[in-house]
Image (tube, rainbow, N blue to C red):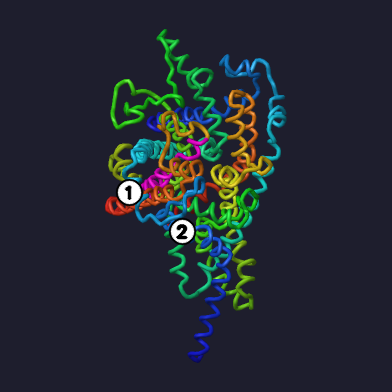
Amino acid sequence: MTAKNKKRATRIATILGLAYLLPNLLGFLVFTAGPVIFSFGASLTNWNIMNSPPLEFVGFRNYQQVGQSSQFWTFFINTVYFMAFIPVGIAGSLVVALLLDSRLRGMTLFRTLLYLPSFTAGVAIMIMWKGLYNPDHGLINACLRGVFDLFSLPFQGPGWLQSTQNLMGLHPEKIAFAVKDIGLGAREALVFMGFWAGLGGGNMLLYLAALTNMPDELIEAASLDGAGRWAVFRHVKWPQLAPTTFFIVIMSVIGGFQGGVDSAQVMTGGGPAGTTTTLAYHIFRKSFVEYQFGYASAVAWVLFAIVFAFSGLLWKFGNKETNY
Amino acid sequence: MKGSIAKGAFVYTALVGLAIMSLVPFFWMLFTSLKPLSEVESGSFLPKDWRPGNFQEVFAQIRFGRYYLNSIFVASWVTYLTCLTSALAAYSFTRLEWKSRDFLFRVYLATRMIPGVVTQIPGFAIIVNLGMLDTYAALIVPSAFTAFGVFLLRQVMLGVPKALDEAARIDGANSWQILWEIVLPLSRSGIITLAIFSFMGNYGSLIGPLIMLKSDGLRTLPVGLTFFDSKYGSQTNLLMAASVMSIIPPLILFIVGQKHLVKGIQLGAVKG
């Protein structure tokens, strides 16, 4: 083949390759890649479509405002508060996976039943939980009341979605702690709903797949050497699960920073007193309730930077942990 | 032997407990949806006075049937387009050799880290400028090109042996025929998985439709339910009836597609 022909063949191959990619690429450029660049540009302006002042380039002023805004830091803390429960959720999924990996009869049925909450999750399920948490006629306080009555204890049910109390006693508006703020409020309500939905969900299935694929010989060898169940888990299974755990942690952290929009919109409106407003919900409201497009874009980029930094750290730290 | 019986008892007890916790909320919702409002507050688990008429009452109060159809219509279109464009792209990324292919794939990969909130405002502005605000297209078009679908199907197609298309090529098949007659049929299970995920994701999506729609007649179920809840939130029984009805399609999909779902979650997790 002559050099000219070869060049022509490469060009034809490129055109063909791009032609197959084109429908997706076009959409990708218009609705993903383009908007990313556009969004950064927007964050440097005073763009606001409601009381539109003349569109102006304001440099990094929006970013300065984000840093100085006490609201931003409150909502950052809210987001971190929710994320503090991620390890508990992951551990729960691992326990369920270990139970299902027992290879006893009927495990497929249990897997199906436990996966159901995560598959049906959505607005309908959130409305269901709103009903369950209702302090007066919801199922949860009814059950709690039943237990208290059994022991003839006086019952004052948690306010759940209507309460600003939380397990750490965080004050709703400022960064302070008080005993009277300790309790079960809206934040815990959302966390528990998350546990219910997530326990048998995707993370559990990932752990279960990793456990199922683990070579039996390893575990048998360890058992023959007299290792107990805990020792087998700690020294054989857990190290082997490290890549799965790493993947789940990274995805949960990325998802955690961006979470809380739907549940806030449907169940709490971000309240009471802003306690369930996460950063992502804050951005949504700044964008589509207040229409401060420039400022909201800046907050979105700050969030992006936080996600980027955290996943970078995890990557560095986690990869070290993964190589035993 | 004694140890394994104890272990079995422990495993079953724990799993039965967890299964009950998973299912009780669903039954509470179902039974509440069948109660008259006066009984909702009395707190008994089963209705004394069964009211299946609550379900009809939902249709009388809001355009529930319309929301239902809108949701299914939008989700079906997105699913169809996503599968089509993702399959073509994944084929290009796995089977065709061309310049800057791997570079472009890395660009796709990189965008996976970007939070959705970053593209939300520009996405809205684009829809406004295309004149698609408050139309079905505003819900369908932006969702039809996910990078996620490309990853998933790329992963699937990498698993289809290349020897098969070499053989077909020798028999004179062109790349289009190889795609439709060899690669796609062998990626069937992956495509079904993508279809289920993409249908579910769009059937349940709230924020997109909330931003893009104004007319009541275009509302999808999640938006319609939220609206019903904020306007008539005290009718717990009717709200539960509406919620029960809206999880029926996912339930059917769940029963039919279970096998594919379990496999698909593992596929989606493989590092690109």
What is the quadrant of residue B57 in the picture? top right
What residue appears at the point 48 percent right and 57 percent down from the top-left corner?
Answer: A35
Q: Which residue is mark 1?
A: A64
What is the chain letter for disc 2? A
Compared with B259, A88 (above or below) is above
Relative to A250, B122 lies left or right: right
Q: Secondary structure at mark 1?
A: helix
How far apart are labels 2 and 1 at the CA level?
20 Å
Q: Amino acid at mark 1?
A: Gln
What is the chain letter for disc 1? A
The C terminus of chain B: image quadrant? bottom left
What residue appears at the point 69 percent right and 21 percent down from the top-left corner?
Answer: B51
**What segment is highlighted magenta in the picture?**
A243-265
Q: Which residue is mark 2?
A: A38
| Residue A324 in sight in this render | no
Total number of numbered labels? Answer: 2
The N terminus of chain B: image quadrant? top left
Q: Secondary structure at mark 2?
A: helix
Q: 10 Å neighbourhood of mark 1: few (<14), some, or many (≥20)?
A: few
Compared with A316, A158 (above or below) is above
Q: Position of residue A285 (x, y in %)?
A: 47, 41
Q: Amino acid at mark 2?
A: Phe
Which is nearer the eye, A194 or A228? A194
Q: Position of residue A97 (x, y in %)?
A: 43, 40
| Residue B101 in sight in this render | yes
Majority secondary structure of magenta residues: helix
Q: Which of pointers 2 and 1 indicates the residue nearer the eye? A: 1
Q: Earlier in the sequence, mark 2 or mark 1?
A: 2
Q: Are marks 2 and 1 in contact (CB under 8 Å)?
A: no
What residue appears at the point 39 percent right and 24 percent down from the top-left corner?
Answer: A184
